[in-house]
Every structure is written in structure tokens, then in C-alpha cells.
Image: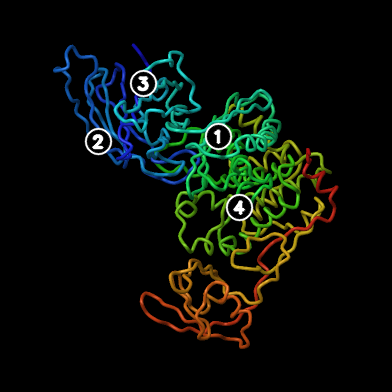
Amino acid sequence: MPTALRYTLTISNWRAHQFIVVLHIPEHSENTLELFLPSWIPGSYMVRDFAKSIIDIDATVSETTTEEEVALLPITKLDKQTWQIGTQGKPCTVRYSVYANDLSIRSAFINDQYAFINGTSAFLKVSGFENAGCELNIKLNENDPTTANWKAYTSMPTRLDSASSSGWHFVAQNYDEFIDHPIYVGIADTHCFNVDGVSFTLLFSGNNNIDYERIAQDLTPICKHHLDLFGTPRAIDNYLFMTLLADNGFGGLEHKYSTALLYPRFDLPQVGESSKKTDSYITFLSLCSHEFFHTWHVKRIKPNVMVNPDLSQETYTNQLWIYEGFTSFYDDVTLARTGVIEPQKYLDIVAQNVSRLLQNAGRLKQTASESSFDAWTKFYKQDASATNNIVSYYTKGGVIALGLDLLLRKESNDKVGLDTLMQLLWQHYGIDEKGTPDSVIQDLCKTHFDIDVSAYLDQVVYGTNDVELASLVREMGVEYRTRPRVSSDDKGGITSQPAIINQLGATLKPASFGLTVVQVFEGLAAMDAGILLNDVIIALDGHIVNVQKFQRLLDNAQASTVEITLIRDGRLITLPLNVVKARPDMAYFTITDELKLSKWLGRKS
């Protein structure tokens, strides 16, 4: 009796954003089978209800004598994502169509250039066959000239008999592995490079004038850093960086042997352009660094509850500050360690992260541990009040990781640091993928380093204290300071521009007339004055304003109170606004000892 499930995916109608899946289920011992589509995709902690995109579904008996004898099997929908089929143990064929119009890296999308498919959005799981092999055949619509030159790409292993005119053939050992390989079918540019025997492929949607050789050169030392950090046994032999290019958009999602990225196409270096690294290109390299680091730290080292998660509902963990936070530390520091960016540029990036925290009143209300647990709702479903009420386990987790590294180095006379801890996590939890307990960090530090970090973690992870950077970063030859912002788009870091004098305490964006309020920060003038989200500010002390004029008028205010005129839900309102001096909520770092900083970085070039 064959044990493998056979899936055929056909790109049937890109104009309607639809593909068709045909699933062949072999003979089995059950009278009924349950088929299920996940509600969420590992690595993105929000229930997305992928099954809502299934348009129609039916099931028939397979391997009948004549076509006329093919009979529809009874199929009953049990809940939003589960179907029951009465099979009487016979082999059967399930056919369903899927709507794919979510341009992100978490779901599925089809247009005239390509189709991108995550398994969690496409492939039904069959009860009793969770550990069965899965075979995939990908086909194109033979009658559509638009897709004539499309090709299929995925990190999924190719089936031995894949050289076939009927499409592309792939195989996975079980369902969990099957859905962990995103699939790209379409027009693409590819570029390959090798690092220490590991083969890497860059894939970018469409045909572009992007300088792929330059990207590969910059990614080579980054990939080598991660490979060297975790050492043997090697987790991979091949890896695919799959990038969907768009006019706008940003994102990344890790998989064991690949990553799916979404990035603005013109933020990447073009052939013939200057070799200077723009901020947007540095961000792309950091994104690649981040997702590749997840190859070990999330995909293999993972919280115990994520070893076999229930994909039908939320799976809660307090540990995301370890996984996304530590990775957020390594994604940027790796660029500095390998010479891809200069040390001061790295410090400016850290300063921008710290600045986001300093402006975030939510960091004083929610702990990093609580942020991890509430990722499903408070972090992934943020509204405009988020900055006042929650903290990011990415951002604060990255600063926690920096502080932990400096603390370990200080307590051990520079014998151990976060690198040593990451290697212990890999050796004890990642190689066998057995899952980490909530106390893993303090346990490993105490057991292997004889260093008690519980007080530090109680303050900054399980409490709402800020990491005491001022004293810690001196150990790396750096001075930490704060300053007022210099403009509305100031992100932090060193600057020579003059600071603003007075601070509104709200984020504004240009409207067709005036300025729309998109955020109001606790404890500052705007909230005290009663300015609300979506108000449209049109004047200050009787003068019509734009972004530049508003700040200039506020800085030059001669009285302690000014009048601000705004439109709220069709009403014209004038409010008194207290003139408040700008607070020093932007961080920056200066280098005081270049040799000490270079030693801390372990800079390789």
C-alpha cells in the first residue's frame, strides 16, 4: 500500500488570482478522514485563517473502473479550517481551488509575473498521514502564453524522476517538512555563490537591473559568520534567499532551508551605481542576516512549545525575546564584525533601536516576556496606541542581548559572551531540536559559566527596567548619551543638525490640507492638550501649517501657551497647547576607545 500523499498544484488562472490543488490520498484503514489547513504559519505569530481562501472543495473515489463510475464522496465542513470526508478506507482524490492575492511572505500571491505559495496556504493536512511522505507536482496552465516561460523554484528536494514534461516534481519526508518550503513559480533572476562548501542561491522576482554580484559579495562574509558561529554539525548544505520585489513592502520569514523576503526593488543596488551602501541597502543586508540566523535560532533551537505546535490555534510562549531579540542583535552586529559596515554606522543603528524604546511609554507597562506571550494579539495586531502600551520583543530583546553579552564578558573577564551562549544553545537544544524551557538562559549561564544573570533578567525581561547601557557600553569603548530630536524624521544616532527646541509629542503626516495626527505620545504636550488620533492640524496661532512651518512656529513661540486649530470629524476646534521643551529621547553613541571596540566586535576586516 503506497503511503505517500500526492499533491498537484496548477497555476490555473492568474487573472483571478487562483490556483488548483489536487490531492491523491492512498488506501487507508479509516472510514472517515479529516483534512485541515493551518491557521498560522510558524515564525509569524498571528492567526491568519488561511482556509478562508479555499473557494471550493470536493472529493471522489480514486482508481475506479470507468470515468462514469467516479462518485462524489460525502464531505462535511467541521469548522473554519477542517473538512471530514467519508472514504470507507478507499483511495480518494480531493480537489480544491485557492484564492491567492496576499502580497506578503506569509501567505500566497499570484499576478502576471509570478506565483508565490506557502504550504500553509495551499496544502491540506490529512489525519493519520502526518508522518507520510508528501510528493508535489507543479503544473502551469498550458493554454496561457503569459506563463509559458515560468519556472518553479523551492528549497524542497527534487524527486529523482523530476525530468518530466508534465511539470516540476518535489518530495518531502512528512507534512511539517512539506509546508516549510515556500514555492516560487514565475519569472526570476537567480545568482549562486558558495561559502565554505554551502551553496547559496539568490532569487529575485522578475527581470531586473540589480547588482546581484555585489549583493552576493556582501552576503558572503555574513553567511560565513553565522556558519562559523554555530560550527558543526552543519545545519544546511544548500540555502535559498527568495526575494519578492515590490514598489513598497518589507518583510522576512524564516524556513529551515530558505527564507522568503519582501523588499522595495529600487532600494537595492543597480548595476553601474556607486559602491556606497545606502541605508536601505544596509537594511536589506541586515534582513538577510536576520533570516539566515534563524536557520539555527528558531528553526532548530526553539521554545519547547514550538517543537510540535498546534497550527490550528495560538501557541503561547514567553521566549520570543530570546529568539527574535537575540537574532535582532546578531543581524546588525554581524555586519560590523565582518566589515560590511563601519563600527560607527553599527552604533548609529543600535542608537535608532534604543531611541524607539525611549519614545515608547509601553516599555514601562509591558515586559519583554509579556510581549512575547501576547505576540498573537498585542504585537501582531497593533493599533495607533501601541507605542503607549506595549514593547517590542524584537527591539527590547535586541538591547537585552547586547547588555547580556557585555555582562557576561565583564563577569568572566572576557572569557565568555553571547557567542558562547549561542553555541551552548545549539549544542544542547538545536542539534536534536528538543526545545528550550523558559529558564534556559539563566540555567545555561549558571551551569556552564557559573554566572548568575537572574537579577539582570528579572529587571529587563520580567520587569520593565531599561537596560543600563551607560555603564555597560563603556566596557566596549563607547559612550552612551541622549539628545532631543532634530526633526520629525529623526531616528537617532549621531547628527550635526541643530535640535528642535519645543516638542509637540505626536507623529504627523501631510494631509491634502494640513497635518494628520497618526500617533499621540503619553506624557507630552499633544496628549495634555487633548489632541486625538486622526485630527487634522491646520494652523498654529492663526498661521496655516505644513511639517516644516509647524515646527518652526512651535520653536519660535514666545508665550507658554499657543493656540492650535484642527479639524476633528468635520468640526473646527481650537485648543490651547502648552509649549514644552523637547525631551532628550534620542540615543547616540560615540567611540572613546577604537581598539577596545574593535576587540569587542572581533572585527575580521
**Which comes before the other along the chain, label 3 or label 1?**
3
Q: Is residue 366 visible?
A: yes
Element at label 3: strand
Which three-letter amino acid code belongs to the residue tagged 4?
A: Thr
Circle 1 — which element? strand
- Which residue carries the number 3 mark? 5
User: Which quadrant, please, contains the C terminus?
Assistant: top right
In primary-sequence order, the first of circles 1 and 4 is 1
**Residue where numbered disc 2 is placed:** 56
* First-in-chain label (4 vs 2): 2
Mark 2 vs 1, N-terminal side = 2
Rounded to the nearest whole Å, what is the CA distance between mark 2 and mark 1? 33 Å
Residue at the image point whose x is 25% and y is 25% from the top? 32
Q: Which residue is mark 1?
A: 241
The amino acid sitting under disc 1 is: Phe
Residue plotted at (47% across, 51% down) = 380
- Give percent across and percent down for residue 372: 54, 49
Q: Position of residue 459 (x, y in %)?
A: 66, 55
Q: Residues within 10 Å of mark 3 (few under 14, many from 20)?
A: many
The quarter in which the N terminus is drawn is top left
